Image (cartoon, rainbow, N blue to C red):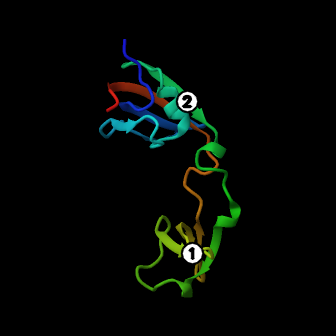
Amino acid sequence: MQTAKNGDTVVIEFVVKTNDGRVVGGTENTEPQTLKIGNVEIFPQIEAALTGMEVGSEATVTIEAENAFGPRQEQLVVDIPRENLPPEPAPQPGMTLSAQQQDGSTLNLVITEVGDTAVKADGNHPLAGEDLTFGLTLVEIKDAA
């Protein structure tokens, strides 16, 4: 039976869970995902698990936070004076802001708290600090070109 190898385009179904079992992603409500092994389109640990799998095979891969979205960095949680924000729309928890960092790169922030004089915003990825467990199913293998 054919097994997936580097250079193959594969179709997978997956679910992503945190250590506490919370589902944070996957293909359950979408189409299966197509990717090419070796193109670094997904975590390298996932590519390694897919390599050698046969269609219909399942695998579970856990990726530690340091190798996923990194540890939480408290210095990325900042207070922003409300006078530094535009008056409209009014800031609400869950809104995103973009801030230019000293090196010129852009940091996306999510407002977590709104106070009378300032808002608290978090620049960490929502899954920073989380170990992630992927449940994988290989649906199809398309040979490398």
- Mark 1 and mark 2 lie on one chain; the one further toward the N terminus is 2
User: Up-down: is 110 above or below 43?
Assistant: below
Q: Which residue is mark 2?
A: 61
Residue 84 x/y as whole percent: 55, 85
Which element type, helix, strand or loop, lies under badge 2?
A: strand
Q: Which residue is mark 1?
A: 104
Q: Residues within 10 Å of mark 1 (few under 14, many from 20)?
A: few
Q: Residue at (48%, 64%) from the top-left corner? A: 94
Q: Quadrant of the C terminus?
A: top left
- Between disc 1 and disc 2, the foreground one is 1
User: Up-down: is 111 above or below 57?
Assistant: below
Q: Quadrant of the N terminus?
A: top left
User: Up-down: is 118 above or below 12?
Assistant: below
Q: Residues within 10 Å of mark 2 (few under 14, many from 20)?
A: some
Q: Between 37 and 59, which is closer to the camera in this rendering?
A: 37
Q: Between 3 and 33, which is closer to the camera in this rendering?
A: 3
Q: Residue at (64%, 71%) from the top-left corner? A: 78
Of all residues, the one furthest to the front in this rendering is: 145
Q: Is residue 25 visible?
A: yes
Of all residues, the one furthest to the bottom in this rendering is: 83
Left or right for 36, reference 115: left
Residue type (three-letter) at the residue carrying disc 1:
Gly
Residue type (three-letter) at the residue carrying disc 2:
Val
Spatial distance from mark 1 to mark 2, Cα to Cα?
36 Å
Residue 17 x/y as whole percent: 52, 37
Left or right for 67, reference 95: right
Residue 124 x/y as whole percent: 59, 59
**Residue 39: quarter of image:** top left
Residue 73 x/y as whole percent: 68, 59
Q: Between 46 and 51, which is closer to the camera in this rendering?
A: 51
Of all residues, the one furthest to the top in this rendering is: 1
Which element type, helix, strand or loop, lies under badge 1?
A: loop
